Structures are given as C-alpha cells and as structure tokens.
Image: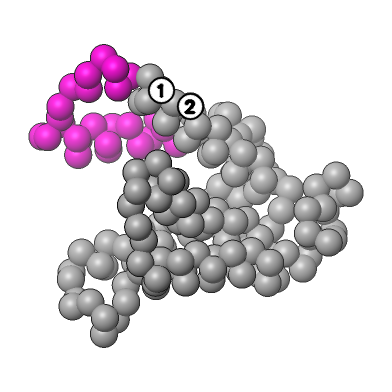
C-alpha cells in the first residue's frame, strides 16, 4: 500500500522504503535476541549511543536551532520515543517477534488518525487499506495464535 506499483511512477527513493522495512525487521530480531540478556533501558542507551553520532553527521549540514517554545515538544517526542523502545524491548522478552512486528506497524494508522484529528490532513484510501491490513495482521499472525502460551497476566488475545 506504500509503494503502489502501477499507481505511481517509479521513484528511486522508494528503494529507501524497502531498505527501511528490512532494517526495521533486522532491528526487531536483534532486539529480541539482545533483550533476553539486558534490560530495555540499557538496550535503549546503547542504541542511542550508536545512533546519535550518525544522526548528527546527517543533521549538521542543514542544522537549524529550534525555538524556545519548541523544546517542550522535542522533550516530549524524546521521552515518548524512548518509552516506546523500552516497552518494545520488554515486549520482546515476553512475546514472539511475529506477534510484536504487526503491532509495531500500527504506528501508521495511529499517525494517520492523529494527522487527521490534529492537523486536518486527509489520508487516501490506500493508507486506510494498509492500516486495515496491519490491524488484520495483529489478530491473524501466527504469534497472535501462540499468545495462549504466555503467562496469564500477558494473555491479551483470547
């Protein structure tokens, strides 16, 4: 639903979407493996330690200092992003990656809904079809069927 072959002309930047998807899958598998041995907070610390220098190299050429009224939003995005990664790492300890992967992709419809509610941005039908596909994968994935093997307090799908 993102690439839309035949609907949109080919753009080489679309390959970036595919690389991003493969990178995301790799990060989830690595997180699953590493989260078994260290806490989520330590994992996120090392991830940020590795990513900040790369992000700085990419950001410095076009760097613009934020205004003072934007710092609260920047801190909120940083705090919620960090919490999201910590919770994902904790989830990886408890559940299979095939269950958490589709749940992680629920960011697309959530972001589209917030864009519509807060900014009046309308998404096209393909976006909502993709959102429905992500939601369906959450319930139909093999990981969702194995949720019965989790401890009682973590059994979300029954």
Q: Residue at x 72, y 64 (%)?
A: 144
- Please give the name of the residue rendered at 18% of the width and 69% of the height, measured from the top-left corner: 12
- Residue 97 is situated, as x and y percent measured from the top left of the image, at 63, 58
Q: Quadrant of residue 63?
A: top left
Give the x, y percent position of residue 38: 63, 35
Q: Is residue 153 left or right of residue 56?
A: right
- Does the image show residue 97? yes
Report the label total.
2
Callouts 1 and 2 close, C-beta under 8 Å: yes
Q: CA distance from mark 1 to mark 2?
A: 6 Å
Q: What is the x, y in percent for residue 111?
A: 44, 49
Which SS type dominates the magenta stretch? helix
What secondary structure is marked by label 2? helix
Of the pair 64 and 94, the residue shown nearer to us = 64
Q: Residue furthest bottom?
A: 6
10 Å crowding of disc 1: few (<14), some (14-19), many (20+): few
Left or right of residue 14: residue 141: right
Q: Quadrant of the C terminus?
A: bottom right
Q: Is residue 111 visible?
A: no
User: Would you place residue 11 above or below residue 77 in this image?
Assistant: below
Residue 152 shown left or right of residue 53 in the figure:
right
- Residue 75 numbered mark, or none: 1
Tell me which colouring the rendered structure shows.
Answer: one colour
The residue beneath circle 2 is: 79
**Would residue 43 be found to the left or right of residue 35 on screen?**
left
Determine the secondary structure under disc 1: helix
The magenta segment is 47-71
Q: Height in image: 100 above or below 18?
A: above
Query: Is 38 rendered above or below residue 10?
Result: above
């Amino acid at each position: 639903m993102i690439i839309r072959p035949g609907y949109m002309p080919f753009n080489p930047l679309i390959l970036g979407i595919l690389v991003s998807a493969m990178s995301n899958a790799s990060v989830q598998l690595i997180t699953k493996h590493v989260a078994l041995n260290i806490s989520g907070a330590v994992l996120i610390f090392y991830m940020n330690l590795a990513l900040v220098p790369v992000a700085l190299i990419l950001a410095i050429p076009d760097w613009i200092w934020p205004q003072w009224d934007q710092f609260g939003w920047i801190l909120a995005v940083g705090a919620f992003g960090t919490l999201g990664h910590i919770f994902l790492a904790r989830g990886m300890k408890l559940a299979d990656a095939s269950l958490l992967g589709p749940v992680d992709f629920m960011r697309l419809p959530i972001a589209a809904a917030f864009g519509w509610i807060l900014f009046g941005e309308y998404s096209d039908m393909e976006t909502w079809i993709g959102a429905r596909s992500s939601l369906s994968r959450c319930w139909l994935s093999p990981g969702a069927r194995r949720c019965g093997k989790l401890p009682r307090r973590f059994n979300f799908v029954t």
